[in-house]
Amino acid sequence: MTAELIDGKKLAADVRERLKMEIAAGQGEDLPVLAVVMVGENDASRIYVRNKQKAAAEIGMVCEVYEFAESIGERALMSSLQDLNDNPHINGIIVQQPLPEHIDPLKILAVIDPAKDVDGFSPTNLGLLATKEPQAIVAATPKGVLQLLQSTGQELAGRHAVIIGRSNIVGRPLAMLLLNQDCTVTVCHTKTRNLAEIVRQADIVVAACGCARLVKADWIKDGATVIDVGINRVEGKLCGDVDFDAVKEKAAYLTPVPGGVGPMTVAMLLENTWEAAQRQFREGKAGSAAGHGHHCSCGHCRS
Ligand code: NAP
């Protein structure tokens, strides 16, 4: 069997195109605004932020970057986030990680208004996801993985999904998301015994461990679906957590790296921001209903 590749690039482009049309159609409303908070200097973060700004601009979304010195204190950063929470122009807030050592990311995430927490990393949104509340904002990478799975058209209920990795940004929220889809979910990590044996039982494998080509072809049940979240650089080339060339001959569906989960992550962040903005516009907490309508000179509004 040769796997059908799931084209994350195409799927993400479709999502971005839909968002662009929906935003353009929202005549009379403010443009959605995403605030990206960066602390200190980090070359990788700067590249990620630039990519987000570019992707936002392409769909007509405003992306504002708030930069703070490495030396900023935890309290001062929390206070600045509170200002963003209170600013009716801002619809979504993300804090670029990693943060400097002296700042506790959990404390910072807890300050973000859950309605603006478009990364979905705050304890409130994780709790809402865990309790299957529809208003949960779901983290972009797990949400992208679900859409990639759904794009194959297969029934998810009752399938055994094995996730390799239990981070707060990928493995854990994905486990809850797939459980909410009635999958039977197993989460593996570095203390898991017989990893290969467990993966062999999976109808769906999601590799999110950051270990280049860890998942081998003989770990994969014939006809399984394999989603590769990993981004690793080996000898200057990008590769995932799955041994792509060999697994391709075993799986029914497989995502490539690059071109699979990565583009979906960015698209889902934009979707989360647009959905949050729409909720705020409807509830009158932002946009024209909050008094920033047709005569606003803020630079974000359409008029
Ligand atoms: P992370 O925080 O380092 O977590 C890695 C997880 O994998 C941990 O739970 C760890 O277990 C587990 N793990 C590591 N080695 C393992 C092994 N040999 N066997 C079994 N489990 C193992 O990483 P992350 O932030 O979740 O990211 C995971 C990968 O996805 C990275 O390559 C990252 O670059 C990539 N990523 C991609 C996207 C995208 O948009 N495509 C988004 C986010 C992340 P313990 O908990 O026991 O340590």
Image (spheres, rainbow, N blue to C red):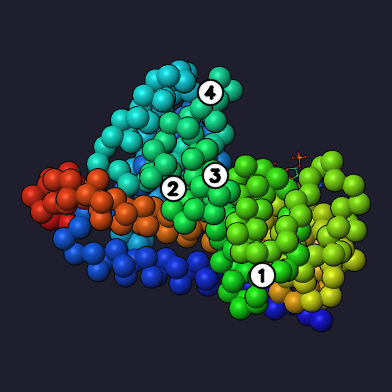
x and y percentages locating residue 19 in the rendered image: 37, 65
* Nearer to us: label 2 or label 3: 3
The number of numbered discs placed on residues in the rendered structure image is: 4
Mark 2–mark 3 CB contact (< 8 Å): no
Residue 126 is marked as 3
In the rendered image, residue 24, in percent from the top left (x then y), is placed at 26, 66
Which is in the foreground here, disc 1 or disc 4?
1
Q: Nearer the viewer, mark 3 or mark 4?
A: 3
Instruction: Estimate the x, y position of residue 302 in percent, counting from the top left.
Output: 17, 56
Q: Amino acid at mark 1?
A: Ala
Nearer the camera: disc 2 or disc 4: 2
Task: Kindly identify which numbered label has been placed on residue 29.
Answer: none
- The residue sitting at 42% across, 36% down in the picture is 112
Disc 1 to disc 2: CB gap under 8 Å:
no
| Amino acid type indicated by mark 2 | Val
Give amino acid for label 3.
Answer: Leu
Give the residue number, with chain letter if any, for mark 1: 157
Q: Is residue 124 left or right of residue 296?
A: right
**Mark 4 = which residue?**
103
Label whose residue precedes the other's in the sequence (3 or 4): 4
